Image: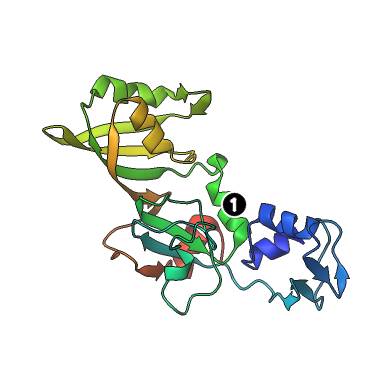
Amino acid sequence: MARFLAAAGVASRRAAELMIAAGRVRLNGAPVAHPASFVQPGDVVEVDGKAVDRPARTRLWRYHKPPGLVTTHRDPEGRPTVFANLPAGLPRVVSVGRLDLASEGLLLLTNDGALARRLELPSAGWKRRYRARVHGSVDERALAVLGRGISIGGMTYGPIEALLDARKGTNSWLSLSLCEGKNREVRRVLAHLGLTVTRLIRVAYGPFQLGNLPRGAVREVPPKVLREQLGAG
């Protein structure tokens, strides 16, 4: 059942499990007791009393997230969200990972929650690539050390490829590549090096590029490309 709900784009698999535990999911009118319950053809699945459509074919979109939006469906602080600002006409989608409030750039969206979870895992081996504008004195030897991974305040971060692209006074542009993408990882690691991030742009996630996609725009990944990269569609 959890996998069915994730594939239907209702929520991530983990969030679906929590919905089931909270008694919000019913199968053919009866409460679902376990996330491993099977859904058969013809079964009726409801969440909060509303029927859930059967999963459509897997689809993926590139979205150029502007700064100032949080990557969530509902924000308890009332801040503007990514999903409230998407162009009209999209089905219900979930994001592949997140970008924090101040960050911008490529955010992948999909109607398949199970796929989103799979692509977020470091085991997928997909690199996230960023460009960061920083304020402070950049030590290229310290950047090179990040390639071996680093621990900060008890948190361990995996290898990060970091290169200095340009420097003008106390401001510099860096290129960074990493596979984990922990919460605010780039900002925390660079802060540890004495650098303040003043702009952070994700330019690629795995094989998918931001390219010249305008800020706030969404473009669907063609099914042929999706099949080639994911074996999906």
* Place of residue 189 in the rendered image (x, y in percent of width and height, measured from the top left): 39, 30
* Placement of the C terminus among the 4 image quadrants: bottom right
Colour scheme of this structure image? Answer: rainbow
* Placement of the N terminus among the 4 image quadrants: bottom right
Front in this rendered view, residue 65 or 59: 65
Q: Is residue 158 visible?
A: yes
Question: Does 102 sit left or right of 53 as displayed?
Answer: left
How many numbered badges does the structure rendering display?
Answer: 1
| Residue located beneath label 1 in the image | 117
* Residue furthest out toward the front: 77
The kind of secondary structure element at disc 1 is helix
Q: Residue at x 86, y 66 (%)?
A: 31
* Place of residue 53 in the rendered image (x, y in percent of width and height, measured from the top left): 68, 76
- Using the image, determine if residue 47 lies above or below residue 78: below
Q: Residue at x 69, y 74 (%)?
A: 54
- Using the image, determine if residue 182 lies above or below residue 18: above
* Residue furthest out toward the left: 169
- Using the image, determine if residue 119 lies above or below residue 221: above
Q: Residue at x 38, y 69 (%)?
A: 219
Q: Is residue 222 visible?
A: no
Front in this rendered view, residue 178 or 216: 216
Circle 1 Cα neighbour tier, 10 Å, few/some/many (<14 / 14–19 / ≥20): some
Q: Amino acid at mark 1?
A: Arg
* Place of residue 222 in the rendered image (x, y in percent of width and height, measured from the top left): 44, 69
* Place of residue 65 in the rendered image (x, y in percent of width and height, measured from the top left): 37, 59
Front in this rendered view, residue 21 or 180: 21
* Image quarter of residue 187: top left
Question: Does 122 sit left or right of 50 as displayed?
Answer: left
